[in-house]
Amino acid sequence: MTQQKITILGATGSIGVSTLDVVARHPDRFSVFALTGHRQLEKLAEQCRRYQPRFAAVLDEGQASRLRELLAPFVLQTEVLSGIEAFEQLSSASEVDTVVAAIVGAAGLRPTLAAVRAGKRVLLANKETLVVAGQLFMRTAKNSGAVLLPVDSEHNAIFQSLPQPWQGDLAMCGVRRIILTASGGPFRAYTLDAMSQVTPEQACAHPNWVMGKKISVDSATMMNKGLEVIEAHYLFNAAPKQIEVVIHPQSVIHSMVDYLDGSVMAQLGNPDMRTPIAHALGYPDRIDSGVSMLDLIGKNLTFERPDDARFPCLKLAFDALERGGVMPAVLNAANEVAVEAFLGRRIRYDQISSVIAAAMTQAYAHSAQTLDDLLAVDADARRFAQQQLLRCAA
């Protein structure tokens, strides 16, 4: 069996940690070529000591110097690099077979696109790659022959529920709609008045999943699901009207595919990201993920329609997808600014959606032909969202 050499973009985040757990279970199948990180340097150093990658990379030279200091007492062959160019280099290197794209936010765009240009097998966990640059990303993948395997639990569930091999056309395989499930987060039963008072700590306390702060807030507002709607549009060539979201608080059914004959295929499992990661790493084989078996005895599975008044961010995402062009990039940029401000206690929880909605009313002159064009839109939307924060504070 030939070992897959893997680069993990965002190794210290929850997806990166879960990926390394699966990789460690299959030393005959996988070896770590490179790890990248950002703020959690001690954690990245520990990962380097354990998995001994050929390279490690961080975003600036100051972080690189600190990482080298942390690794100095150990006899390792790991070379420490810095800068976004290093991330791109390590995701497109000729030695690499598989790239796990798990950097949160727009920072993951360039290295993920570099992996796709190089025709790599890309395990996609970075939502922003498709939300900001969906058309460019999918066109590049088609031209390069890159293999895209979704790692988000919902898109992985859809992929597993589609006929294999997936040919990229829902109509050809008789699909009527894609149904994305959502937990509803910690506030699905809150009144609107109560939601205006929630704290960052409450928003980050997800009832089912262990995630980073930004993703946890996105889950609470259901922007996370809105971004997944846009992703599903690109990944599965689905029209907005073919994508539905339902709240499923138990997080047992991870998503479903509804067929024209009335059949509904669903993927079920315990809420553990190692399941979709193991599926994508091993595909088309099935490999052990370390996740315990699902026990359905005594479980009640329930479903609800999302409430637009309680979850305005989900509607904003559907609006952005319908409007098309650069609007999904604007939505994503404004959301990142607003969530950061909420986590910093500079705006209320219920003001996150107002900042995004205001940014979406602006005119953006840029075309969307290149990544630089899209990043210019991203920068403009962030500037406007920052201005809107001042209005919220006034």
Image: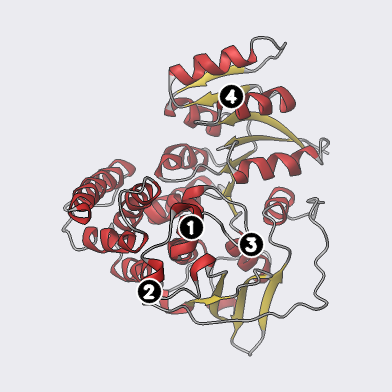
Secondary-structure class at tag 1: helix
Callout count = 4
* Above/below status of 287 relative to 171: above
> Residue 192: where, in percent of width, then height?
38, 74
| Residue named by callout 2 | 192
Tags 2 and 3 in contact by the CB under 8 Å rule? no
Query: Horizontal placement of 152 versus 52: left or right?
Result: left
Mark 4 vs mark 3, CA separation in Å: 32 Å
Which comes sooner in the sequence, label 4 or label 3?
A: 4
Mark 2 vs mark 4, CA separation in Å: 45 Å
Secondary-structure class at tag 2: helix
Residue at (68%, 45%) from the top-left corner?
Answer: 18
> Residue 193: where, in percent of width, then height?
36, 72
Identify residue type, mark 2.
Leu
For residue 277, say whether it is visible: yes
| Residue named by callout 1 | 203
Labels 4, 3: front one:
3
Residue at (53%, 77%) from the top-left corner?
Answer: 246
For residue 314, say whether it is visible: no
| Residue named by callout 3 | 208
Mark 1 vs mark 3, CA separation in Å: 13 Å
